[in-house]
Image: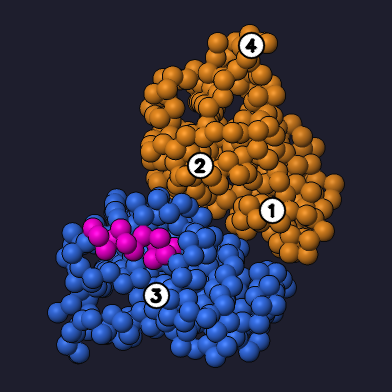
Chain colours: A orange, B blue
């Protein structure tokens, strides 16, 4: 039996959990969404690190074999502190995303979009250049993408969605990138609009690479009935209202916890 | 001497502080921006109340004569808990905003825009109807307005700004409102775009009504040199980068505190 702890600032990390459940259907999971403190992307590295440590301690206290940091901002700034503080392996989304981008890119001109915290940390830029030293990385924060995704304004034919995507992505098109990392778990919901603004560019979502890495680290017997528990730090209602859409299967219960 | 404590979830409450400083130039102020937990507008009433109590306790521990809750969401959901817990008078922004709207409206058809938390609480709707029982109040949450204001995308000629304002405000125009309450301290930055989407409608910003109420409660000798201190719960850099624009005068220092 293996039990995986996963945390995110909110609901977006369920897109990562979805890929993990597809890869490892027999694993138990504990998901913690820090919905009382969401978003992390506009906050300082120190504050995000402090919240990440609290989330991780809550999950390790329940007994987990491995921790997945499904939040890009927390992965970008808090991994060293988490690895120093915890006994279990810690997997973030930045390094797998960088690896997938380097594998996909032919020209080595790679774009990264994310929250101000993720982009400002330089973590994707550093991870990509460590894997491919000649890579030219152009990064851009897209703060309106998260509220657009949460409003459900994601149709690429919508003039507001198209206008926002073009304004953020035109500078990346101008750099001639051939690959773009979606460095925020909300952005896959805007994939069609992002693709329309950057025709021909390969879009990389790190969820599947993360799931493959988790699978490589754990020995999970197939076919057992797995148990999945969900925790949130704000009232569960709003989380439950959208969680199913992000996870791709029903989420019926989430417990409110203080961490 | 009088010392006024003011808190908000972030930087927006400085627009309220600005009106207070204009009305009471001799008063000392302590401003707390809960930038580590911003925004409040998408969180549950319980969580916002808990954060508001912590903010208030921090300010009262420094010694204040009066507390201004400059955040619309906190004013909408946490005032009863704050008044029960504190010894000093507590003034929120909802009741003064409702009073200003009722005074301004000829037809009694009044619109309210704010965060999901403020609108969902029904606090403006209740306060307006208590003052004018026949009023017809139409409320609408506008989640994209805050990130637009923070991006500096506020020009009414900008097609994205115009598109978002029209989408949110068209239903209010359809209701035939003659007065609109800007029920979030970020919204005055979008005043021109909101006015363009609702021609002829009176826009009410509660900051000045709040300042008048504070002035009526405190005896402040004019002409003394006042002291203003700023506290934030996240790193001060981002707050300091925009605070001057919201306050209308320079903000040079802000202390990082845990509350």
Question: How far apart are the two marked residues, 1 and 2, measured between alpha carbons?
Answer: 19 Å
Verify CB contact (< 8 Å) between mark 1 and mark 2.
Answer: no
Task: Classify residue B86 by image quadrant.
Answer: bottom left
Asked if the magenta segment contains residue A21, the reply would be no
Between residue A47 and residue B213, name the one nearer to us: B213
Q: Residues within 10 Å of mark 1 (few under 14, many from 20)?
A: few
The dot on residue A224 is 4
Q: Position of residue A150 (x, y in %)?
A: 63, 52
Relative placement, left or right, of B91 versus A231 is left
The dot on residue A152 is 1
Q: Earlier in the sequence, mark 2 or mark 4?
A: 4
**Which chain is mark 1 on?**
A
Which segment did they paint magenta?
B73-85
Q: Residue at x 63, y 11 (%)?
A: A224
Question: How far apart are the two marked residues, 3 and 4, measured between alpha carbons?
Answer: 57 Å
Question: How far apart are the two marked residues, 4 and 1, measured between alpha carbons?
Answer: 36 Å
- Whether A31 is drawn above or below A114: the answer is above
Q: Position of residue A65 (x, y in %)?
A: 49, 17
Most frequent secondary structure within the magenta stretch: helix
Between residue A107 and residue A149, name the one nearer to us: A149
**Which chain is mark 4 on?**
A
Local secondary structure at mark 3: helix
Local secondary structure at mark 4: loop
């Amino acid at each position: 039996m293996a039990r995986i702890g996963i945390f995110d600032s909110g609901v977006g990390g369920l897109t990562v959990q979805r890929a993990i459940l597809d890869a490892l259907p027999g694993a138990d999971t504990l998901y913690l969404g820090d919905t009382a403190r969401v978003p992390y992307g506009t906050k300082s590295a120190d504050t995000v690190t402090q919240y990440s440590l609290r989330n991780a301690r809550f999950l390790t206290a329940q007994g987990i074999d491995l921790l997945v940091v499904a939040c890009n901002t927390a992965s970008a700034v808090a991994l060293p502190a988490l690895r120093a503080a915890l006994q279990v392996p810690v997997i973030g989304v930045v390094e797998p995303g960088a690896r997938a981008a380097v594998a996909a890119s032919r020209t080595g001109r790679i774009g990264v979009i994310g929250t101000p915290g993720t982009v400002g940390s330089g973590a994707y830029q550093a991870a990509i250049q460590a894997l491919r030293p000649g890579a030219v990385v152009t990064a851009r924060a897209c703060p309106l993408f998260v509220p657009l995704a949460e409003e459900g304004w994601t149709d690429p034919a919508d003039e507001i969605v198209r206008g926002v995507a073009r304004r953020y992505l035109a500078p990346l098109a101008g750099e001639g990138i051939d690959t773009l990392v979606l460095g925020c778990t909300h952005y896959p919901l805007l994939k069609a609009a992002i693709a329309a603004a950057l025709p021909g560019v390969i879009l990389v979502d790190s969820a599947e690479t993360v799931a493959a890495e988790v699978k490589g680290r754990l020995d999970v017997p197939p076919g057992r009935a797995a148990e999945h528990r969900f925790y949130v730090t704000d009232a569960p209602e709003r989380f439950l209202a959208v969680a199913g859409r992000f996870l791709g299967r029903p989420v019926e219960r989430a417990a409110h916890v203080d961490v």
